[in-house]
Image: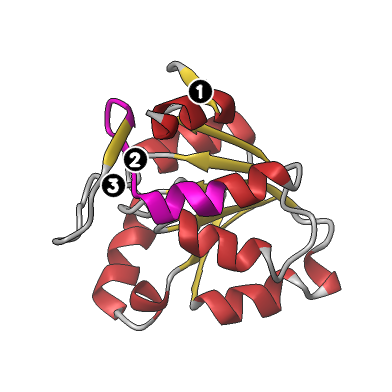
Amino acid sequence: MIILVRADDRLIHGMVAVSWTSAIKPETILVANDEAAGDSFKAATMKLAKPAGVKLIIKTKDDSIKALNNPINDRKKIFLVTETVEDACYIWERVKGIAKLNIGTAGVNKKPGEEYIPTLPQVFMTQKEFTCAKKMADAGVEVFAQITPSQDRMNFKEIEKIFAK
């Protein structure tokens, strides 16, 4: 069972490892990222940052989809972390049971040539990411921007207002 999906371009770091895992108490953190799955140094760094008592798995997006669709994982509390909202949407389209998308510090590591629109401090989205988030929200997924569980939360209606300007 996926308890939360977080789009965060830094993947596993202090906020994810400490704040979010403390708040949602997953058994497993699944990082769905093609680059990280193929980079042993990046994977080792993330494993050092993970909290004790929580299993960390790093897979490609497609291998993550296979794992999430395996009935053996239905009863596990899984915290899914993707680099972008687009990646989260790609997985959502192929996996049932995703109910919440947290747009975290996505957009901190901006890609050249992309226009990023701020929603909250440290939370930026591209038009493509907004379109993906809207698709998910329109289908009933709870989409929100929030840096940590103790900080202000922006619901999707508020995000939508920013993009309507």
Identified by mark 3, the residue type is Gly
Q: How many labels does the image show?
A: 3
Nearer mark to the viewer, of 1 and 2: 1
Q: Which quarter of the rendered picture does the C terminus lie within?
A: top left
Instruction: Please rate how many residues cluster around mark 3, counting C-alpha atoms within 10 Å: few if below 14, some from 14 to 19, many from 20.
Output: many
Which disc number belongs to residue 158? 1
Question: Residue at (72%, 52%) from the top-left corner?
Answer: 98
Which region of the structure is painted magenta? 119-133
Which disc number belongs to residue 105? 2
| Sequence-wise first label, 1 or 3 | 3
**Residue 128 falls inside the magenta stretch:** yes
Q: Is mark 2 on a helix, strand or loop?
A: loop
Question: Residue at (73%, 66%) from the top-left corner?
Answer: 95
| Sequence-wise first label, 1 or 2 | 2
Q: Is residue 52 above or below residue 59?
A: above
Question: Residue at (41%, 77%) from the top-left corner?
Answer: 34
Q: Which quarter of the rendered picture does the N terminus lie within?
A: bottom right
User: Looking at the picture, how far across and down is residue 73, in whole percent?
Assistant: 78, 66
Q: In which quarter of the image is residue 69?
A: bottom right
**In front here: 54 or 161?**
161
Q: In this view, does 161 lie above or below 142?
A: above
Identified by mark 2, the residue type is Thr
On screen, residue 108 versus residue 130, left or right, reads left
Identified by mark 1, the residue type is Glu
